[in-house]
Amino acid sequence: MKNQKMYEADDKMISLIRDNYDLLQSLGSFGISMGFGDKTVKETCEDNNVDTYTFLAVVNYTINGYDESRRMGASAGMFEADERISVPTLLHYLEASHSYFLDFQLPYIRRELTEALNENDALARLILRFYDEYAREIRLHMKYEQKTLFPYVESLLAGNPTSDYNVETFSKHHGAADKKLRELKLLIIKYLPQDGLHNNQLTATLHDIYENEVWLHQHAQVEDHIFVPAIRRLEQIVKQNDVTKNIADMVFKGDNSQNSDALSDREKDVIVSLVQGMSNKEIADHLCISTNTVITHRRNIARKLQIHSPAGLTIYAIVNGLIDISAVKI
């Protein structure tokens, strides 16, 4: 049974790999080189320009699975769409994982099957055809992500998202890609008994197919439970920023920047208090000034900004960074 443990930044990287040798491929996809000696996970990640938190989120998920990672990591705040997840790090990891599987694993398994199967056996040829159909399917699956999803995420990171696409479109059509590998493995076990050298080769090939089946399942789960929620959150941030920009473009034109500079700190405090729904008396108590002084500040604010309504002041406060848009009901 796989060792279940939530690894942390101060753990030795060699301990993590020694306990979970199947993470070696993940190191390569993150761009982490071997030869890290006795350095901690944090030190190793920093040496390789990899976000430590994101690395640990993927690694702990891979080791423990989704439900167990949530249970074991709840106290540390490991939840879906965690704001500490680095989307650029995760994107690089997934792109490199695709390259590893398409450019190395698929051809490697094909060569193993060719060597292990009797090319004169009609059933063996059908098995190879089945594998080729699977390979085409998985290539299409991953190429779609590389041509559509990943560029979309890059556009989000650049603050200029594609208008006709979102991560929900991907999520709704993101099916498991490991089913055919499982079927291939069972077909070989059931219908292609071999002996001698070929049996040894076939057994080794079956082991590699099983490892790839597990890898593909974990890869899909990382996309569903870490990547997709992180992109949803990124979409919300970009949308929020876009809303703020649109408000600024539509409402605040001309020389309002000069008006903003003309406001005193006390007047800005009054605006924030008004946006929060305080009455004149409550503002006076909050700021330790008289009610008459509050009224004077409000008159000056209206004169300087030419804004008289609470809604207008709310928009002004958002655009000028006096309050966060997430705290306002729109």
Image: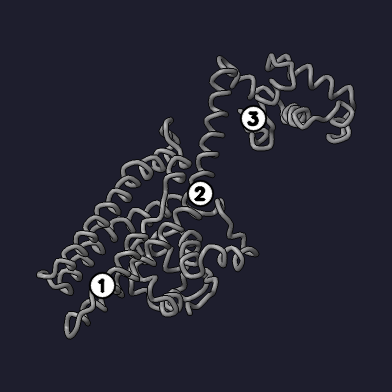
Name the kind of residue labelled 3 in the image: Ile
In the rendered image, which quarter contains the C terminus?
Answer: top right
Q: Position of residue 259 (x, y in %)?
A: 64, 19
Callout 1–callout 2 Cβ contact below 8 Å: no
Are there few (<14), some (14-19), or many (20+) residues within 10 Å of tag 2? many
Callout 3–callout 2 Cβ contact below 8 Å: no
Q: Residue furthest bottom?
A: 196
Q: CA distance from mark 3 to mark 1?
A: 68 Å
Residue annotated with mark 2: 230
Residue at 43% x, 54% y: name it: 90
Q: Position of residue 125 (x, y in %)?
A: 16, 64
Nearest the camera: 254 or 65? 65
Residue annotated with mark 1: 191
**Mark with earlier residue (3, 2):** 2
Name the kind of residue labelled 1 in the image: Tyr
**Mark with earlier residue (1, 2):** 1
Mark 2 secondary-structure assignment? helix
Mark 1 secondary-structure assignment? helix
Residue annotated with mark 3: 318
Nearest the camera: 63 or 35? 63
Q: In the drawing, does residue 211 fall left or right of residue 259?
A: left
Q: In the drawing, does residue 264 fall left or right of residue 25?
A: right
Are there few (<14), some (14-19), or many (20+) residues within 10 Å of tag 3? many
Q: Quadrant of residue 186?
A: bottom left
**Mark with earlier residue (3, 1):** 1
Are there few (<14), some (14-19), or many (20+) residues within 10 Å of tag 1? few
Q: Position of residue 149 (x, y in %)?
A: 38, 43
Name the kind of residue labelled 2 in the image: Ala
Residue at 48% x, 41% y: name it: 168
Q: Residue furthest left?
A: 120
